[in-house]
Image (spheres, rainbow, N blue to C red):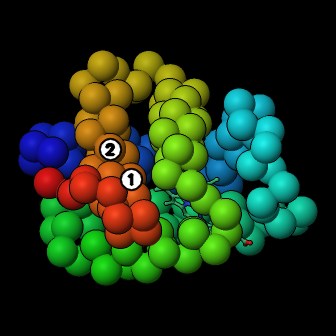
């Protein structure tokens, strides 16, 4: 990711922060719509899950300019996800739901540059998590 892309991700995420819980509702609704089979993997009450997702995203987004500060936590998160039943092929589905949510939340602020920056951020993060959890030869750059 370029420094400009990191800034775009950070400034756009800050715009979604005030509607964080609503964004998480939209995200899981979308995820379960496009991938109904993963719904059973999640708890029935998603209240805490929504908070955990958004606070983890906030942590990762704030650490993008200093990746070494987030990689250990991302690695541990990826390994925990194996026991949740997450598979490597789920990551692109989750990424698409996340980008869709950001597009809805940001409206006109979802520019092609912002979309590219988020694609780069999610590709970097998910590639690293997949490599950590499943040993695929992909690394964060
Ligand atoms: C970068 C991508 C992802 C992020 C940032 C993320 C974040 C989180 C966080 C913060 C939690 C709370 C529990 C914990 O911290 O261990 C969680 C739980 C969970 N995630 Fe993810 N996740 C990601 C990708 C995925 C994928 C690809 C799947 C596959 C369907 C998935 C399925 C789950 C499930 C089922 C739980 C709930 C586990 C339980 O409470 O029983 N996640 N995720």
Between 19 and 50, the residue placed more toward the observer is 50
* Residue 57 visible in the snapshot: yes
Which residue is outermost to the right?
Answer: 44
* Nearer to me, 80 or 18: 80
Residue hosting label 1? 126
Residue 131 image offset from top left, x and y in percent: 33, 61
Q: What is the quadrant of the C terminus in the image? A: bottom left
In which quadrant will I find the N terminus?
top left
Picture coordinates of residue 99 (x, y %)?
48, 34
Query: Is the shortest distance between ligand 1 and the CB of mark 1 under 8 Å?
Result: yes
Point out the quarter of the image occupied by ligand 1. Answer: bottom right
Left or right: 20 with respect to 99?
Answer: right
In the displayed structure, 79 sits above or below 105; it is below
- Asked if the residue at tag 2 contacts the one at tag 1, i.e. Cβ–Cβ closer than 8 Å, the answer is yes
Q: Is residue 9 above or below residue 76?
A: above
64 versus 19 height, above or below: below
Residue at the (44%, 44%) spot, across then down: 15
Q: Position of residue 63 (x, y in %)?
A: 26, 67
> Is the residue at mark 2 in contact range of ligand 1, meaning its CB lies under 8 Å from it?
no
Q: Secondary structure at mark 1?
A: helix
The residue lying at 36 percent from left, 46 percent from top is: 122
Q: Quadrant of residue 26?
A: top right
- Mark 2, secondary structure of its residue: helix
Q: Residue at 79% across / 43% down in the picture?
A: 37
Q: On residue 123, which mark appears?
A: 2
Depth check, front residue: 44 or 111: 44
Q: CA distance from mark 1 to mark 2?
A: 5 Å
**Residue at the (16%, 68%) spot, across then down:** 66
Q: How many marks?
A: 2
């Amino acid at each position: 990711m370029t420094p400009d892309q990191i800034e775009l991700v950070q400034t756009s995420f800050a715009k979604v922060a005030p509607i964080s819980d609503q964004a998480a509702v939209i995200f899981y609704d979308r995820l379960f719509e496009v991938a109904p089979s993963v719904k059973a993997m999640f708890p029935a009450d998603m209240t805490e899950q929504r908070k955990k997702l958004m606070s983890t995203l906030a942590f990762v987004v704030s650490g993008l300019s200093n990746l070494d500060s987030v990689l250990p936590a991302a690695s541990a998160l990826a390994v925990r996800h194996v026991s949740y039943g997450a598979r490597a092929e789920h990551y692109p589905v989750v990424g698409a739901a996340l980008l869709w949510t950001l597009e809805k939340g940001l409206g006109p602020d979802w520019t092609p540059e912002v979309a590219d920056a988020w694609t780069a951020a999610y590709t970097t993060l998910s590639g690293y998590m997949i490599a950590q959890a499943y040993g695929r030869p992909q690394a964060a750059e």
